[in-house]
Amino acid sequence: MRILDRYILKSTVKLFFGCLLVFLFLYVIIDAFTHLDEIIKNRTGLQLLGQYYLSFFPMIFVQISPVACLLATLYTFGKLNRNNEIIAMRASGLSIFQITKTIIIFGILVSLFVFLVNDKIAPQSSARTEKIKAMMESGRSKKQDIINNLSLYGLRNRLFFIKKFDPATTTIEGITILEHDSQQNIIRKLVANKGLYKDGFWTFMKSITYNFDENGQIKGEPQYLEEEMMIIPETPLDFLTQRQRPDFMTIAELEDYICKLSKSGAKTAIRNIRVDLYQKYTLPLTSAIIILLGIPFALSMRKRATGMASIGLSLMGGFLYYVLSAVGIALGKSGIVSPLFATSLSHLLVLTTSLYLISKLP
């Protein structure tokens, strides 16, 4: 590695980890003071509180790594530009790529590490955070919110799709239950307007049951009942604790879940989960791409603007990236664009803009 590359890399790495530590510290302090009254009211111990915030670290790392990369890029090259070191490098015959390749490689390595953390560590960390939060809130009366659009893969190869679930009354509405055989072929489908759990039994109102043959075709006449009582192992507590949440699942688990849903005909649920799956692939790319966005701005900084301009541009860049990503995901989950394009939209726009701005540099 050249002396120049080591010089740039050393500054970038120091700033990157410095930003991570500052952001982590600020997050913990702000969150602790925001919920200070609840912490005191629940008499939460320091050990449990420490475990709670430690479980947050992987998620915070995934979220703030792009901003830390952008800030490190802007400040490092902004300082070099202010000291006329960029002019000296260009005068010696170095191209923009030769000057910036070290930090681009650093961004790629950060993206790879973010991918591993987001897939292997963050799901378990998110689940552990929820459990610790429940422990912290134990003993305190709290109204449980109504859950909309709930899906669950239950026992006996059953898939549950529920439009609305009220934990307080243990009632469910808009129910679709799909039962499969060992080869994941659908054999039975139940549709009901409403369901009530009482004394270990589920009672469904205005239910229609369809039976299917080995070819997936409806067999016989559908059976309609005003009221039907069924013995189903899943209880309301299972719907609360075992519901499928993409942030609690790895890429392999999401792919397996999509495979199980593929024969259910639940197109909306499958599309939403595909968006979450592709987001796990594309989200880590943010760190590398946002470095490319920061390069033209950093090399265009003048004089004393380096410090404040770095912070301002990094915050603005991170905010715009977040907005574009949110818009893309919304378009994908609404079915306007494909899931893959929805999760790649922000990256494609920012990458194109970055390469265009870099090509216009003198």
Image: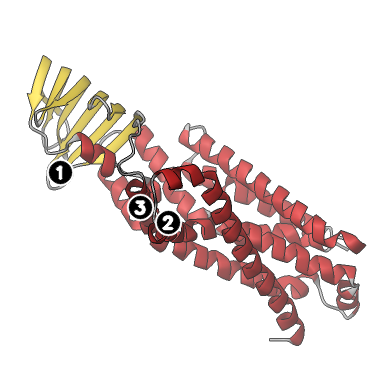
Looking at the image, residue 73 lies above or below residue 343: below
Q: Position of residue 1 (x, y in %)?
A: 68, 86
Looking at the image, residue 295 lies above or below residue 331: below
Judging by the rendered image, the residue that carries numbered circle 1 is 155
- Mark 1 is surrounded, within 10 Å at the Cα level, by few (under 14), some (14 to 19) or many (20 or more) other residues, namely few
Q: Tell me which numbered mark, 2 or 1, is placed earlier along the sequence.
A: 2
Cα distance between the residues tagged 3 and 1: 27 Å
Is 227 left or right of 103, judged from the image as shown?
A: left
Identity, as a three-letter code, of the amino acid under mark 3? Ile
Q: Position of residue 167 (x, y in %)?
A: 27, 30
Is 86 left or right of 190, judged from the image as shown?
A: right
Residue positioned most to the top: 226
Q: Tell me which numbered mark, 3 or 1, is placed earlier along the sequence.
A: 3
Q: Tell me which numbered mark, 3 or 2, is placed earlier along the sequence.
A: 2
Identity, as a three-letter code, of the amino acid under mark 2? Leu
Between 224 and 313, the residue placed more toward the observer is 313
**Rendering quarter of residue 242:** top left
The residue at 74%/71% (across/down) is 100
Cα distance between the residues tagged 3 and 2: 9 Å
Residue 184: which disc?
A: none
Judging by the rendered image, the residue that carries numbered circle 3 is 132
Looking at the image, residue 328 lies above or below residue 126: above
Of circles 3 and 1, which is in front?
3
